[in-house]
Structures are given as C-alpha cells and as structure tokens.
Image (cartoon, helix red, strand yellow):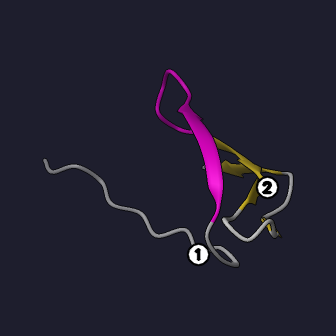
Amino acid sequence: MGKPVYLYPTEGTVFFMADISEDGRYIALVEVPFTDGNGAENGKYRVHIIH
C-alpha cells in the first residue's frame, strides 16, 4: 500500500505544526500567523482537526 496523499485547501500560505493520533485516525494542525519580509502579518491562529 502506498503513502496516503491528502489535499487540505487553505486561504493562503500558512505556517503550521501537526501531529497524528496513535491510531492514525486524527490529525491536528495548529496554524499560527507569520510576518513576511515586508512586515505584513499573514495567517490566523486556528486549530484544525482532520479525521
């Protein structure tokens, strides 16, 4: 069996950290804003739970 591939659309470029539950049923993503080279803040504080 091959590696699963998922598409999760977002509003734009995001910075996030992720973790997967032990049984593989859930993925949690924590999205945080970041500042680009021009000083503009991008993204929002959000938590995404995917199952």
Which sits in the foreground, 13 or 28? 13
Callout 2 amino acid = Pro
Callout 1 amino acid = Pro
Indicate the position of residue 6 as horizontal and vertical percent values: 41, 63
View extreme (front): residue: 38
| Residue 13, above or below 1 | below
Q: Which mark is residue 9?
A: 1
Q: What residue does disc 2 label?
A: 33
Indicate the position of residue 13 as horizontal and vertical percent values: 61, 70
View extreme (left): residue: 1
Element type where label 2 sits in the image: loop
| Mark before the other along the chain sequence, 1 or 2 | 1
> Label 1 crowding class (10 Å Cα cut-off): few <14, some 14-19, many 20+?
few
Q: What range of the chain is rendered magenta?
A: 14-26
Residue 26: image quadrant is top right
Indicate the position of residue 14 as horizontal and vertical percent values: 64, 62
Q: In this view, does 30 lie to the left or right of 17?
A: right
> Label 2 crowding class (10 Å Cα cut-off): few <14, some 14-19, many 20+?
some
